[in-house]
Amino acid sequence: MDLHRPVDSNKTYEDMTAEEKLRFDHQKMHELHRGHESMHTTMVLILIVTLVVAQFVVVEWKKRHYRSYAFLFNNKIVQFFTMVSMWSIPLALSFNKGWWRFITIWTVFTLLTGIVIRKSTAKPMSNTTPRLVYKWFYLIYKVSCFLGIVGYILMMATFVGINTFFGHKPQQWMDVALVLLFYGLYFGVLGRDVAEYCTDKMAASIGYYTKEGIPTRQLESNVCAVCGNQLMVNVNEEGILENTYKLPCGHVFHEFCIRGWCIVGKKQTCPYCKEKVDLRRMFTNPWDRPHILYGQLLDWIRWLVAWQPLILFLAQGINWLFGLE
């Protein structure tokens, strides 16, 4: 389909065929933005430079004055407030705009996650709770990763014009791509925040992990330090349901437990001795690499959301100074 072929100007929009409407909308969009290419490019470059500079400033801040950085980023009260804000503000906006699809999905996610949170904070805690919690959040993590990848592929397909082969408007494909990306990134970030909260609660309840690094229980042999249950197979044996992982420090764990602890719960230390864990060396399977990279992306998105108002304010201020619209 040639989107630039002229449309009969004597026809009204209602009298046009679907193909003519598609060509008309495409040409109208180009006419609206004619001559703005350099301006739009400049505005995008300003936003990118602002993001890069902001990232550099935060890294230098962390190196030169870690106490103030840790108070803002590693403070549990601040993190809990951020998590509650991310959980509630999109819902309020959705009610205001009437986005019932998001409200429905948010409600289902909140109800199921609320049950998981209640189990993770219950005392005494059931022996099956840690594995249930980690499996739930690992499922959320994988689903959000899938949605994000599909949304990204669909967006790239729209950029190269594949939608024209199916006779669809680029806006239709782009809308679907952005919705998938939003759901993947939003529930991915929120799920990891809640998983980290549940991880701290469960680990402190079990007793093998404390924030100070001094366990309140002695780790027995052949016991997982995350959930406190017996290991079913040895490190070198192939398990039917899951394998056993051994960290460089010598401590062993259930596969789902250590995956939930490191990838979903955002912990990069041994749950028992707090020795640093290299995720790339521990999870050598190529299929695990996308999960690790996606987790790093979610951490960056969380940082971006926290600082988004200030970054956009700076970018808009620069655009205003240069007279860009």
Image (cartoon, grey):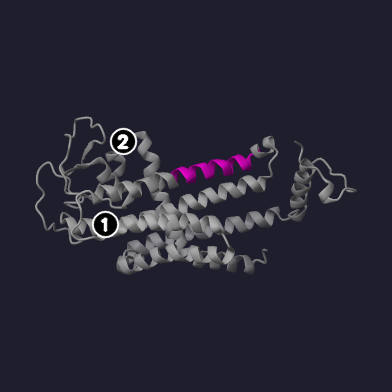
Q: Whole-percent x and y of residue 220?
A: 9, 46
Q: Give x and y (percent) for residue 50.
A: 52, 60
Residue 120's tag is: 1
Residue range corresponding to the magenta coloring: 145-161
* Residue 33 falls in image quadrant: bottom right
User: What residue is at 39 percent from the left and 57 percent from the top?
Assistant: 111
Residue 16: x %, y % from top left: 82, 45
Circle 2: residue type: Thr
- For label 1, count other residues whose C-alpha is less than 10 Å away and answer few (under 14), some (14-19) or many (20+): many
Residue at image coords 51%, 49%? 181
Q: Which residue is mark 2?
A: 284
Please, what is the dominant secondary structure of the magenta stretch? helix
Pick whichever of labels 1 and 2 is earlier in the sequence. 1
Q: Amino acid at mark 1?
A: Ser
Counting from the top left corner in percent of width and height, residue 200 is at 25, 58
Rendered residue at 74%/52% (across/down): 29
